[in-house]
Amino acid sequence: MKTLRRLEADPDVVRLQRLLSSHGYFKERTPPDGIFEEVTHENVVVFQLQHVDEQGQALEADGVVGAKTWWALENGSGEAQRNHFQPIIPDGLTTRRQQLLEMIYNEHAKPVYEVPDGSNRSPDIDGYWGNTGVIGQPWCCAFVSWVLREVVGGYPIEGQHHIGVQNMWRAARRAEMETPEPKPGDIFVQLKANGKGHTGFVVGVSADGLSIYTGEGNCGNRLKIGLRQKNSINYYIDCLRDAQSLDFARSKFDVQKVGGQGTR
């Protein structure tokens, strides 16, 4: 499969756009068929933020559609997009952070995935929007807000059920919630152009300190336990502000050896 880049006119762009659409992208604006213009480029970047390659590694969100992104487009949900990590709660966390991770893992074990595939919807996903009146849109930020409400009993980031990544980040920055070093229970933020982005929770940190384990919605069209390089993350938010120290256990989230819940 050839490599595609922004603004190249090519018949394969039609296939690219149809695959993106089948995974629930282009909800806001529909691009012209076969033209790799700004709208298509933006949606490729967001798709890359939310999917892994054949080795289970997060895609580089550069907007270039090469072999790894083509594979993910062809395998954008279901078993191919699972990392099969065994969820764990690291030792050394505050009670509130333990509760937050337990909530994420309980949802993950259901499992939660889009029905139908690419719709951004399911009974569980619709519930993540709270009383915002919104459904059927990219839901990573809505999941973060829902978890915080369930665990904290309210909305710690300016009292709002945030549904947009960049607005949530701006509100957290105003409230001086940015933190330089990720801790389980913090929020990770990835920002891209024109209001695009992705978010979820940190659930662990690798032993070498170079990667974070994540609990994130709208990733591979499901709620997922993932692994991301720290250098791919723009910011971290500590909205619990519970004096959690950096003296918590770093360990590998072992890959599950046998099938169980969450095989979708």
Image (cartoon, helix red, strand yellow):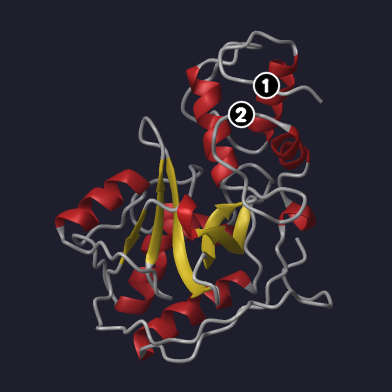
Name the residue carrying label 1: 4
Q: Is residue 18 visible?
A: yes
The N terminus: image quadrant: top right
Q: Quadrant of residue 227?
A: bottom right
- Observer-nearest of 137 and 255: 255
Residue most toward the front? 208
In the rendered image, residue 177, in percent from the top left (x then y), is placed at 22, 64
Residue most toward the top? 9
Q: Residue at 21% across / 53% down in the picture? A: 171
Earlier along the polypeptide chain: callout 2 or callout 1? 1
Dot 2: within a 10 Å radius of its alpha carbon, few (fewer than 14), some, or many (20 or more) residues?
some
Disc 1 residue type (three-letter): Leu
Q: Is residue 166 above or below residue 176?
A: above
Q: Residue at 52% across / 60% down in the picture? A: 216
Answer with left or right where residue 225 lies relative to residue 130: right
Gap between marks 2 and 1 measured at Cα: 6 Å
Disc 2 residue type (three-letter): Val
Helix, strand or loop under label 1: loop
Q: Is residue 191 above or below residue 87?
A: above
Name the residue carrying label 2: 64
Q: Residue at 36% across / 62% down in the picture? A: 145
